[in-house]
Image: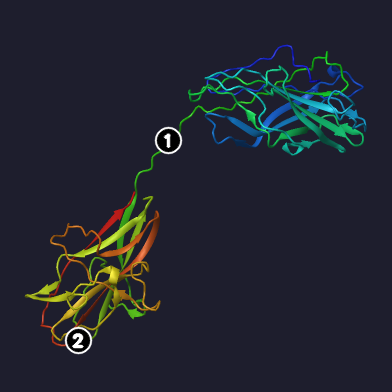
Amino acid sequence: MYSCNKPRTISSVLLGCLFTSFVTFLPVSHVLAVDDIPLVSLTTTLSEPVFSADWDTNPSYTNVKYSWALTQGVTAPSDDTCVALNTGTCLLVNVDLQDTAPTSTHLGQEWMGTLSLGDFTLDGPANSSISHVQRVDNDGNGRFNSLEIQIGCSAACAFATGTVYSITIVNSPIKNPVSVGIPGAYSTLSQWVGIQDGTDAPANTPESITSLVVIGKGLTVTANVDPILTFSVGGFGLPASYYGESVSIDNSAAPDTCDFGVLSPTSPKVCAWYLNIATNASNGYSIYVVQDQDMTFNGNSIKQFKDGTRIDDAAATEWTVPASVQLAHLGYSSNDADIFPPAGGTVAVWAGIPTVAAADAAPVATGLVASNNLPESHQYTYAIKIESAATLPQGTGYTHHEYFMVVGNF
């Protein structure tokens, strides 16, 4: 089987995790001798390379592009009769790999897989196309270390002076040998590429232009990102509403307070706040609320919603008037529809704020205000609502404290 001659000396380099490619091109015609048509340029590039997924044990890649230009024009005749290599006048591209026998710690080098014309693309002159491809076992050892690509012409093909032509290997992977078990220890891989006329005498030695490709895995890259969790509370200015109910108190200047003022029987009031959270926690966050006691003055208290039997957020319900003339109650809600889904899509639902013995005692699975399972920045509305019965005992300072606890799930 005919193949292009390799240069008499092929140099290769081994630098740790380094892949080297020694590439030589020489297009000629059936009229001109090989050495009569020197190359202007030769480049080897990876066009959107596709690497193997198992790079450590089977390092290979594809989308390799070989580009060349000539100092002198060459015309190949319209003689596409070279159905077998080494016949006719079509051009032949030969890519050789340095043949290294595989061992228990070293992977051999060869062209992998079967070949088809669809594995290659040609950017050549008019009337030219790739007519035949095949792998060759040059050394007779069962490994395909040579690739031959045949360019045929349906009519005269004029390779113009200085024009860049190219062949791209788009599917057939090139294997990069590796010392198994030694990360980053890649051995040298030499490629030699030549273009010759199928009738040219193999004794000619192509003129040499070297193209060097370096591919390797020699870096382990790591990075850390500090956890971020910020939380702030903002007050509402008036006029404002919460699910159609008027917000009663303007706390925009003092967002850490709510002064309901004088409570009138059967006249509910609403306070509202903006809760601002930002986090990069990969599993999101949760916001909880607790109170240190019921709103109390002189032994009398405003009960948890509703009627002193606290409703948990998981059972939040529409607001109800206190059931007894001796009671008042207070509830909380938020616009996180996953926790407080509005009744009928428009009416707010409410739950009772859980009480803890001390301000720093944490709720476990109750008092939930809002949550998400993704990292994000978000603004929620938090609201509390109060309503008194007709004969609520007089008091000038019913009060309690509410505390938020924010958990980032990193």
Residue 5, given in percent of the width and then of the height, sits at 78, 17
Element type where label 1 sits in the image: loop
Quadrant of image for the N terminus: top right
What residue is drawn where x is 20% and y is 66%? 354
- From where the camera sits, is residue 34 visible? yes
Residue 78 drawn at (x, y percent): 93, 33
The residue sitting at 21% across, 64% down in the picture is 290
Badge 1 crowding class, 10 Å Cα cut-off, few under 14, some 14 to 19, many 20 or more, is few
Q: Is residue 30 left or right of residue 357?
A: right
Quadrant of residue 19 in the image?
top right
Q: Is residue 125 visible?
A: no
Q: Where residue 59 sits in the image (x, y, percent)?
A: 57, 29
Looking at the rendered image, the disc whose residue lies closer to the viewer, 1 or 2, is 1
Q: Which residue is mark 2?
A: 265
Count the marks: how many? 2
Quick check: 102 left or right of 9? Answer: left
Identify the image quadrant of residue 246. Answer: bottom left
Q: Which residue is mark 1?
A: 222
Compared to residue 230, the image places residue 21 above or below, namely above
Please name the amino acid that badge 1 sits on: Thr
Please state the horizontal and vertical placement of residue 339, each as a whole percent of the image: 33, 67
Above-or-below relation of 221 to 346: above
Q: Is residue 403 above or below residue 212?
A: below
Quadrant in which residue 38 is drawn: top right
Question: In terms of sequence position, does the residue under pointer 1 or pointer 2 come before the other?
Answer: 1
